[in-house]
Image (cartoon, coloured by chain):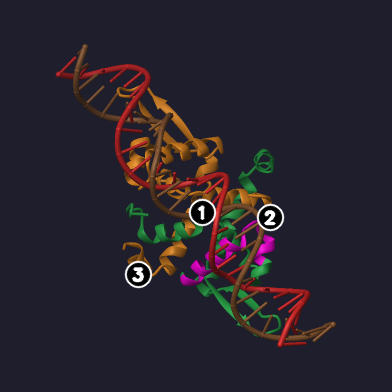
Chain colours: A orange, B green, C red, D brown
Amino acid sequence: MKSADLCPRFETGMELLSKRWNGFIIFRLLEGSQRFSELESSLPISGRLLSERLKELEAAGITTRTVYPDTPVRIEYELTEKGRALRPVITSIKEWAEKWVNSEELDSMNQ
Amino acid sequence: MKSADLCPRFETGMELLSKRWNGFIIFRLLEGSQRFSELESSLPISGRLLSERLKELEAAGITTRTVYPDTPVRIEYELTEKGRALRPVITSIKEWAEKWVNSEELDSMNQ
DNA sequence: ATATACTTGTTACTTTTCGTAACCTCGTTT
DNA sequence: AAACGAGGTTACGAAAAGTAACAAGTATAT
């Protein structure tokens, strides 16, 4: 986005979180490291996008990708310190949602 | 999104915030009520999308739209209580960004 | 009455991003 | 050698976003 002079760092952070799926991926990784297939099956995201997002998050210094040469190969994704520092953000979203998202909205979502 | 069994309320909240531009619109409205043209000129968003997002946010109970019959007509958008309750979320994103978004990232953004 | 100005949108069209499903690679097991 | 399991990638149609030109409503100016 062309700078809107909000606050350059806030813009960068907000863009990261507002990129589709990133919030959910980070939510999952806050529970502990996860394998590609675990993330894929626990979120309604396709392999193509998950792969794309994990590369972007790694490039942004939010996650790491570690290869364990087991058989078959096991690859774990986990949050860096920078990524783990997002916990308060996720927590505040969860708190807001628990207080303000009501059942009608949930119903309309599940149609 | 089809339910991924994260936490239904969190999902709804995260989707709201991850929809493009919503975070920035809310950021602006936390500073006080704004007119359509003020929002449009303070964010790099087109009128078409701003109009669409404001309708969605109003439908979600986050903002209100008030018509003042001045001349020419003046229309103010502002946050509801539910919308103002998002302040801690925006604040936590800002705090994270101030600590963790470094200058290289800002440079790469402004290319 | 007609023209002009101002704000708040809307319409039509192009470009980017997303979603789906089939396919590929690499090491192991049968 | 053929099949399997994990971790992806490719190709392609669908959906969302971006852009720019235009329209509605109201008020003042000519």
Number of marks in the image? 3
The residue pinned by badge 2 equals A4
Task: Give the vertical position of B72 relative to B102 (above or below).
Answer: below
Label 1 sits on residue: A88
Of circles 3 and 2, the one toward us is 2
Q: Earlier in the sequence, mark 3 or mark 1?
A: 1
Q: Which amino acid does label 1 sit on?
A: Pro
Q: Which element is circle 1 on? A: helix
- In the image, what residue type sits under mark 2? Ala
For label 2, the crowd category at 10 Å Cα-Cα, with few meaning under 14, some 14 to 19 and many 20 or more, is: some
Give residue A6's mark: none
**Label 1 Cα crowd, 10 Å radius (few <14 / some 14-19 / many 20+):** some
Q: Earlier in the sequence, mark 2 or mark 1?
A: 2
Magenta span: B39-59
| Crowding near the residue tagged with mark 3, few <14, some 14–19, many ≥20 C-alpha atoms within 10 Å | few
Q: Which amino acid does label 3 sit on?
A: Ser
Q: Distance between the residues labelled 2 and 1?
A: 25 Å
Question: Label 3 belongs to which residue?
Answer: A103
Image quadrant where one finds the C terminus of chain B: top right
Residue B87 seen in the current view: yes
Secondary-structure class at tag 2: loop
Disc 3 + disc 2, Cβ < 8 Å: no
Question: On what subunit does the disc labeled 2 rest?
Answer: A
